[in-house]
Image (cartoon, rainbow, N blue to C red):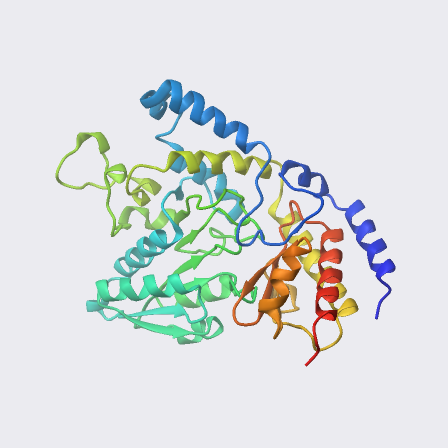
Amino acid sequence: MSDPKDLKQEAERLDAADPLAAHRAKFALDEETVYLDGNSLGALPAHVPARMAEVVGREWGELRIRSWDESGWWTAPERIGDRIAPLVGAAPGQIVVGDSTSVNVFKAVVAAARLAGGAGEGRDEILVDGTTFPTDGYIAESAARMTGHRIVALDPADIPGAANERTALALVNHVDYRTGRLHDLPGTTAALHAAGALAVWDLCHSAGALPVGLDAHGVDLAVGCTYKYLNGGPGSPAYLYVAERHQARFDSPLPGWTSHADPFGMTPGYRAADGAVRGRVGTPDILSMLALEAALDVWDGVAVEEVRAKSLALTDFFLECVRAYVPEGRVVPVTPEPHGERGSQVALSCPDAPVVMPELIKRGVVGDLRRPDLLRFGFTPLYVGFADAERAARVLAEVLAGLPAD
């Protein structure tokens, strides 16, 4: 077993050399807590409360209805979409912010099925990630019933080989929410296109943690949340990406007045606006949207490639510390070791997980539990350091030492 003193010193050395270390000061964090749950809810950027006080006090409180024009409320969904675009490798004009991830999954899947030609034209299958976050599966099944398709649930690794002339689209998570496995977005997208199908990606656990390359890899549609690595706040609005080449034919199953070509004409017939605006539905959720816009300021001057490099270094170091401190067999990593297969979290299988995680939280190490037996630790490179990783592994070992071994 490695000497804890050596690993503590190594953590100090790595933190001192970290080019992203200064960004931690931009967040409302306390030194008593190691926060490793940013893959569920990102930490609060420290400047957001002041911005929200301005939004509520002046823009809503004083300007009131005038803020739709004078404060730019009306254009916020596309403006903030363009702020997110560089973080996922998209050119401007392809992302609109609004609604929840679930609503955007529904829009994307139904629209992709329509773009593919429809079940009546032979493409009657929708491939889905069988290990996906449950809601994605629920939404896909509902979309399939609505469009006359059938669902084929597969391991993500099997989707490229399963795509054929009957495949309309595939809905895949870029990173598995439980294990942290990174799936092959470029290869899967290319295989789907070779079969004449479309690729719809869920980026909830990758946007803000690693390069995505939506444009570079020819992704058709994508969705994602903003309250994890993008730090937008609890329930902050999600986003929808529609590749520019599809926008003229993008047929949303939820046409609303704000996506109308003449929204204030209030005409009974629907005529879709041009561009990403077609992804809008109803009145934007301005308070949470503007909190997100302010939160995105922490990304100014930050390259996603730097974030990815630190993410991999952090998760490598955490696993090294776990191996050093935790007796063999008490936990088993289920997150892949190869960098090309790993997101920005580490999941450990532990029979005592339901007891261990609450005790870790009591001791100031905040991760989360995924039943029945997964301890999940998210590493958000903008504010998590190597000393945090070392302390988390050390406290985990202490908690396990207080429990009887099997």
Residue 138, percent from left and from top: 34, 64
Q: Position of residue 217 (x, y in %)?
A: 48, 56
Total labels drawn = 0
Which image quadrant for residue 327? bottom right
The C terminus lies in quadrant? bottom right
- Residue at the location (65% across, 68% down)? 338
Q: Residue at x 28, y 58 (%)?
A: 110
- Using the image as rendered, state which of residue 387 and residue 310 is in the foreground: 387
* Quadrant in which the N terminus appears: bottom right
Return the residue nearer the eye: 185 or 311. 311
Left or right: 375 as drawn, with respect to 95: right
Q: Quadrant of residue 352?
A: bottom right
Task: Work out which residue is located at the far left of the displayed protein and give it.
Answer: 268
Front-most of 226 and 1? 1
On the image, the x and y values in percent for residue 179 come to 56, 67
Give the left or right position of residue 376, taking residue 214 as reference.
Answer: right
Q: Is residue 15 left or right of residue 227?
A: right
Residue 358, image quadrant: bottom right
Answer above or below: position of 109 versus 301: below
Query: Which residue is located at x 87 percent, y 59 percent?
Result: 6
Residue 158 visible from this viewpoint: yes
Residue 319 appearing in the image:
no
Question: Extreme bottom residue here?
Answer: 406
Identify whether 251 is placed above or below 274.
Answer: below
- Rendering coords of residue 264 (x, y %): 21, 30
Instruction: Work out whether 357 lies above or below 291.
Output: below
337 left or right, relative to 149? right
